[in-house]
């Protein structure tokens, strides 16, 4: 069975497509937006995640780490310091930690395991017109895993949605079009240069893919994340709106408020947040 | 959508705004007037049979109690001239007041002002007569030791007041009126055998009193009309007089008369007995013919109907129930329980929602006070409009309507021998207790059984971990149980030990109620008391159940999951170290406590084996109850609701294997997960709760959920909430209710109570003013998990 790496499955997701949904977050993203709301989704591999607010400073993780990658630092800042180069991703510290302060960001799962989880809320999908949403990261980074989940959903009569930035080869996009009932496409910046600066990649592929998709699929919604000083400039929003309108006049556009929990997520991964 | 559109345009009138404001502002006083009357009657006729003493005392109160009318009221009447008075009923219980009368104004929960003169009269004229003669004293003199011996595990209720939790036969009261019922009773009396004559004599006395009481309101309204100068006010008072005069002479004809008649019924029931919760039941059903006729023939507009409904809605808040300080902690915020059920089905299974169901929701939206306790019955074919109308009102945050599920409740009631027809016509009493209408003494809330304390005793050889006192069966302690099966076996024996003792006490208590508190007026509106000439306390009702609450499934499941997985399974914890940690309240064992809290799954997260641990013990408990028959010949059955008792009950319980600290609250509600431990959202909670043996809890269940107001602000959010309710109806859970509040608002209300006088929150199966709750209960409500971000 095909396996993939996910970093969360969220039930009762009510903003990821129609109805009540379960959203599966797949790990790995080709972009690296400065403001990314799910920084744990950027890297394709599993990472160690440290929730300082849960830590009771018992120090047991330091004792059990065979690689000596963990160090307790009572002097201030983060109590547990992780040497990520040394860390061999053994599970000793995670399974010992009494409070889940140390946790895996990411886990490898089979399609069957994903399906077992999403099946639980079938009744709620039926009552609400909801279903399963694939998100990330960028789900198309694990295209074959995506396809298998989507097929399994279709086979068992579950509605599907995908949240994507569309930075992917055209052939990949092509393979999921018939399997997805609703696309939620993130369009962030109209200006190519700015896009490259803030996300690491040019947006030409994205805009072409968008046009291609919108011409072939009748349920596409555009989402613009409103990031202060990056995407929220009126000209940027207007330009995206005009472009979308020129592709098809009836495509809904949602503007997403910034997630206030984001900065703490960066801290847990030992990363710096650039957009505060 | 027509009814919904029409409703949008209906307003709260200036009259209702003013009445609502006055209802909120009125201070609460202790009232001794009726106690003086009762004492006089009992003193004068010491040799009368008790039912006639009770009847005469009520009749005198109906004739003599001072009455008042607010000139703007459309619906009039109360049991005291002031609203929200704490009425003393000495025949039920008075000893607690001997100790507490001075502290009523300052106690932590449910305060009352007390006049100096009343303290004096109470101590010199009332207390001396009743000492040793009332229900409470008699119970404690005879059974005090037995009650005390089990009190940390079993809290026995209804020891110092009459039993309520009854839904009278309102339809019959409306059909016959007191005059029609009196005629029936007189006829019965002439044919009755010698031992039944006294029953009918009592009934006649109280019905004559009731007619007099209603006439007095007609007379007072006339007087006030004549002395007034404002024509609009005098006009209203003359109308009030006409309505009351009609009701004193016969049954109601109009919608307004029917509402007034309903209110008189409940005032008089509360004058006969200081009981918690006489419930109006399915008002939208039995009032509909009056409404419909007036709309058709009399030109009654929806706006005028709504104003009448809102008038009685305000009245429901003017009778409160004074409990002793201990009891007020378990039932905080005066839950008097005027429970009104709307929607649901006809006995043939058709949807029963009508215009009144919607108007009641509109009234709830406008009034938003703790009473009535509004309950919406949903079923698989409930119209989306109705569910949506409920959703809108829930989103406003008064905690109502609470939602009941016909699909699971009807079969649960039938399993207790209730006919299909009566089960389909069920209503709700008190908070969430299920009942048939007009033919049932359900004796809800007979006792609360603390399954968590029983587990503590099982782990500690029958001894209380807090005090070391021996209370239960000596089954050994945790270190003696070599397997999980051994532990379960000991737990089962411990529960059985306390169930046996509890049932004995319940039987005594009921016999004492028969001895002290026969209720002739109530017996006129509960089938088949009148037909059989048998008082309701003596078993005159068609159905005679007794409800016992099992407390608290979440802590039992979570604790057993730790024992099963971490102690007996993985052996991550040794039996000795966990036992020692619980005995020491995890002092110096913080890491071990965290392991208990986080390393075994918890109830509320859709983990089948954990949920089933809870269900197994609920089933065991329900099976235990079914071994017994109560003194009225009916079954004992299980309820899963705590009112506010999870806070004081938690105070009795030492640290538990689930990581909960000693004396801290248990999980709230009855079926809710322990706060903060459900991490996967509302669908996972519902799926866990659905596994917890609701079908055995025919006495009623309670599930609290908390949502953020923002969730209800958008159409999309309301649609998703509606879908959640429709899924709930298909999950076999009896009840769910919602607090829709922001934590910040509650914190602000704690700091500035005056600014939040009207803020209501859902405590358990009832709503109370947030600022009138004790601080620990306020904190607990804030700690519950919130959904909808």
Image (tube, grey):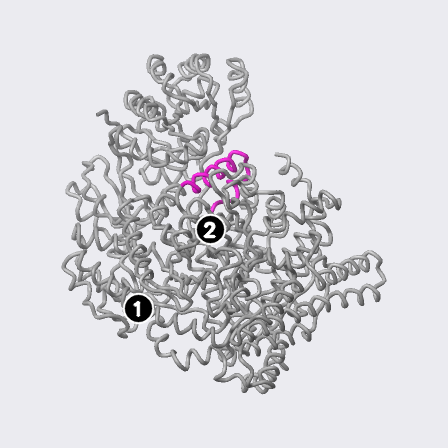
In magenta stretch: residue B713: yes
Q: Where residue B214 appears, x then y in whole percent? A: 70, 66
* Residue named by callout 1: B500
Q: Are marks 1 and 2 on the same chain?
A: yes
Element marked by disc 1: helix
Dot 1 crowding, Cα within 10 Å, few <14, some 14–19, many 20+ = some
**Upstream in sequence: badge 1 or badge 2:** 2
Q: Where residue B239 appears, x then y in whole percent? A: 77, 58
Inter-mark Cα distance, 1 to 2: 29 Å
**Observer-nearest of A143 and B222:** B222
Report the magenta residues as a range. Answer: B706-730
Q: Quadrant of residue B667?
A: bottom left
Image: B232 above or below B185: above
Q: Where residue B442 appears, x then y in whole percent? A: 46, 61
* Residue named by callout 2: B423
Dot 2 crowding, Cα within 10 Å, few <14, some 14–19, many 20+ = many
Report if residue B478 is visible in the image: yes
Q: Quadrant of residue B495?
A: bottom left
Q: Where residue B758 appears, x then y in whole percent? A: 60, 56
Report if residue B742 is visible in the image: no
Can you tell which of label 1 and label 2 is closer to the viewer?
A: 2
Q: Residue at x 64, y 74 (%)?
A: B59
């Amino acid at each position: 069975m095909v396996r993939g790496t996910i970093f969360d499955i969220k039930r009762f997701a009510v903003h990821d497509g129609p109805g009540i949904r379960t959203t599966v977050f797949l790990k790995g993203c080709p972009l690296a937006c400065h403001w990314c709301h799910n920084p744990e989704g950027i890297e394709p591999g599993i990472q160690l995640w440290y929730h300082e607010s849960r830590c009771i400073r018992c120090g047991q993780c330091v004792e059990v780490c065979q690689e000596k990658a963990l160090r307790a630092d009572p002097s201030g800042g983060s109590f547990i310091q992780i040497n990520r180069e040394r860390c061999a991703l053994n599970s000793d510290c995670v399974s010992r930690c009494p409070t889940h302060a140390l946790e895996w960001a990411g886990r490898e799962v089979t399609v069957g395991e994903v399906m077992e989880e999403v099946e639980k809320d079938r009744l709620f999908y039926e009552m609400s017109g909801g279903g399963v949403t694939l998100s990330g990261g960028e789900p198309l980074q694990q295209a074959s895993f995506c396809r298998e989940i989507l097929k399994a959903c279709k086979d068992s009569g579950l509605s599907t949605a995908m949240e994507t930035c569309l930075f992917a080869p055209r052939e990949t996009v092509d393979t999921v079009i018939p399997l997805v009932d609703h696309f939620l496409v993130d369009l962030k910046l109209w200006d190519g240069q700015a896009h490259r600066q803030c996300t690491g990649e040019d947006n030409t592929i994205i805009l072409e893919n968008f046009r291609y998709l919108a011409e072939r699929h009748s349920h596409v919604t555009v989402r613009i994340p409103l990031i202060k000083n990056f995407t929220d400039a009126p000209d940027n929003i207007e330009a995206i709106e005009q472009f979308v309108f020129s592709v098809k006049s009836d495509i809904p556009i949602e503007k997403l408020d910034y997630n206030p929990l984001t900065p703490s997520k960066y801290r847990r991964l030992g990363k710096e947040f650039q957009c505060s | 959508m027509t009814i919904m559109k029409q409703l949008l345009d209906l307003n709260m009138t200036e009259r209702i705004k003013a009445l609502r404001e006055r209802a909120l502002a009125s201070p609460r006083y202790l009232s001794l007037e009726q106690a003086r009357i009762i004492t006089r009657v009992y003193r004068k006729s010491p040799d009368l049979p008790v039912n006639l003493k009770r009847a005469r005392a009520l009749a005198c109160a109906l004739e003599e109690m001072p009455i008042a009318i607010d000139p703007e009221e459309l619906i009039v009447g109360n049991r005291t001239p002031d609203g929200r008075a704490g009425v003393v009923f000495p025949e039920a219980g008075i000893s607690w007041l001997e100790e507490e009368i001075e502290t009523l104004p300052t106690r932590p929960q449910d305060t009352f002002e007390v006049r100096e003169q009343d303290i004096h009269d109470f101590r010199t004229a009332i207390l001396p007569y009743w000492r040793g003669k009332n229900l409470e004293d008699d119970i404690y003199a005879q059974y005090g030791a037995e009650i005390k011996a089990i009190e940390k595990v079993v809290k026995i209720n209804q020891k110092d007041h009459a039993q309520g939790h009854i839904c009278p036969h309102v339809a019959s009261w409306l059909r016959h009126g007191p005059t029609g019922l009196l005629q029936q009773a007189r006829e019965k009396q002439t044919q009755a055998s010698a031992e039944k004559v006294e029953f009918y004599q009592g009934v006649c006395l109280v019905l004559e009193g009731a007619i007099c009481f209603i006439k007095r309101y007609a007379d007072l309204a006339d007087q006030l009309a004549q002395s007034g100068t404002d024509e609009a006010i005098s006009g209203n008072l003359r109308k009030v007089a006409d309505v009351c005069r009609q009701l004193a002479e016969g049954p109601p004809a109009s919608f307004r008369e029917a509402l007034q008649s309903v209110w008189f019924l409940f005032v008089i029931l509360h004058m006969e007995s200081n009981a918690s919760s006489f419930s109006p039941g399915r008002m939208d059903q039995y009032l509909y013919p009056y409404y419909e006729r007036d709309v058709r023939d009399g030109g009654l507009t929806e706006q005028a109907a709504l104003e009448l409904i809102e008038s009685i809605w305000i009245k429901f808040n003017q009778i409160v129930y004074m409990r002793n300080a201990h009891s007020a902690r378990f039932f905080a915020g005066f839950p008097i329980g005027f429970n009104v059920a709307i929607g649901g089905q006809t006995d043939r299974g058709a949807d029963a929602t009508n215009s009144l169901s919607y108007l009641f929701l509109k009234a709830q939206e406008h009034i938003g006070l703790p009473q009535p306790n509004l309950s919406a019955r949903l079923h698989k074919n409930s119209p989306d409009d109705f569910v949506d109308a409920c959703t809108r009102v829930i989103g406003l945050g008064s905690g109502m309507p609470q939602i009941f599920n016909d699909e699971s409740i009807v079969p649960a009631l039938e399993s207790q021998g209730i006919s299909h027809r009566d089960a389909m016509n069920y209503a709700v009493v008190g908070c969430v207790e299920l009942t048939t209408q007009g033919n049932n003494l359900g004796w809800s809330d007979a006792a609360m059984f603390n399954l968590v304390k029983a587990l503590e005793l099982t782990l500690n050889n029958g001894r209380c971990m807090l005090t070391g006192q021996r209370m239960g069966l000596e089954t050994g302690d945790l270190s003696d149980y070599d397997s999980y099966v051994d532990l379960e076996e000991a737990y089962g024996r411990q529960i059985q030990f306390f169930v046996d003792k509890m049932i004995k006490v319940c039987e005594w208590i009921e016999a004492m109620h028969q001895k002290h508190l026969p209720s002739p007026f109530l017996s006129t509106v509960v089938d088949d008391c009148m037909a059989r000439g048998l008082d309701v306390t003596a078993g005159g009702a068609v159905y005679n159940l007794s409800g016992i609450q099992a407390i608290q499934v979440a802590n039992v499941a979570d604790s057993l999951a730790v024992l099963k997985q971490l102690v007996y399974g993985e052996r991550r914890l040794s039996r000795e170290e966990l036992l020692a940690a619980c005995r020491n309240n995890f002092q110096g064992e913080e890491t071990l406590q965290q392991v208990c809290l986080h390393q075994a799954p918890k109830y509320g997260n859709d983990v089948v084996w954990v949920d089933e641990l809870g269900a197994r013990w609920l089933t065991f408990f329900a099976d235990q109850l079914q071994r017994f028959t109560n003194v009225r010949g009916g079954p004992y059955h299980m309820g899963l609701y705590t009112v506010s008792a999870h806070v004081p009950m938690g105070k009795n319980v030492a640290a538990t294997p689930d990581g909960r600290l000693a004396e801290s609250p248990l999980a709230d509600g009855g079926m809710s997960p322990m706060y903060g431990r459900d991490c996967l959202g509302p669908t996972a909670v519902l799926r866990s709760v659905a596994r917890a043996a609701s079908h055995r809890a025919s006495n009623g269940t309670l599930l609290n959920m908390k949502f953020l107001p923002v969730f209800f602000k958008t159409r999309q959010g309301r649609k998703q909430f509606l879908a959640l309710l429709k899924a709930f109806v298909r999950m076999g859970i009896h009840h769910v209710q919602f607090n829709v509040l922001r934590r910040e608002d509650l914190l602000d209300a704690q700091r500035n109570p005056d600014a939040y006088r009207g803020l209501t929150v859902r405590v358990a199966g009832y709503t109370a003013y947030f600022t009138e709750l004790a601080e620990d209960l306020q904190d607990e409500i804030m700690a519950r998990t919130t959904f909808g971000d």
